[in-house]
Amino acid sequence: MHIRSQLFIHAPRWQRAHHGSLPKRRIPAHTASWLFEPGSLTQRLRQLYGERFNVVLLKQSWEKPGSEEARQLKLQPGHRAIIREVALQNGPQPVVVARSIIPAKTLRGADRRLANLGSRPLGHILFANPQLRRLQLQLAQVDHRDWKPDLFAGRRPPTAVWGRRSLYSLGPGHMLLVAEFFLPSLFCRL
């Protein structure tokens, strides 16, 4: 399925993490620790990179999510949401890229600030919310041919990239979808 994205050409094929269809033995151990990280990815990256950690906003606009994304969020066909794509970086080097879908109904009350994050990390706001709950975790492996080459300075990554997608609740009726992809550059330092 094609979706409008600065990250990939085709939407990833997500599978529930707890189903036997994605055995952990297929996932490299160093990657699995990131895929199954229960806490804030932002905090973990800040601990790893210190002051070199930064967020680069690649895209943020009101759009129709992909049909599968809309289904996950229980959105009616045609409803728009904020679609935000960022690169989480070690200095100038992207180590994680992320795509977040934030429906309009989530942007009420204190959660309105999610609409104006700019280059601030989403995780900083999410994990400060005491009502935050992960409702679902899915995994996908994106083939190297499916990434947009612009994301990697004209070259695609040499291997497939693992990602996770979390469906979060910030309270009744306030859901969002966050997909994070762990680039090979993340593991060069580990």
Image: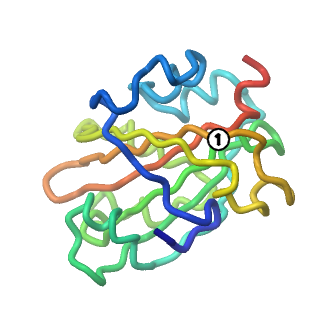
Q: Is residue 28 above or below residue 16?
A: above
Name the residue located 25 percent from the left edge and 80 percent from the top edge: 77
Quadrant location of residue 82? bottom left
Q: Position of residue 137 (x, y in %)?
A: 33, 38
Q: Is residue 78 above or below residue 44?
A: below
In this figure, which colouring scheme has been used for the structure?
rainbow
**Residue most extreme to the left:** 172
Left or right: residue 96 compared with residue 184: left
Name the residue located 71 percent from the left edge and 39 percent from the top edge: 159
Q: Position of residue 112 (x, y in %)?
A: 35, 64
Quadrant location of residue 164? top left
Name the residue carrying label 1: 160
Nearer to us in this view, 81 or 27: 27
Q: Secondary structure at mark 1?
A: loop
Q: Position of residue 52 (x, y in %)?
A: 78, 34
Q: Which quarter shows the C terminus?
A: top right
Residue 132 appearing in the image: no
Q: Amino acid at mark 1?
A: Ala
Left or right: residue 32 compared with residue 101: right
Name the residue located 61 percent from the left edge and 37 percent from the top edge: 182
Q: Position of residue 141 (x, y in %)?
A: 53, 42
Quadrant location of residue 125? top left
Name the residue located 27 percent from the left edge and 40 percent from the top edge: 136
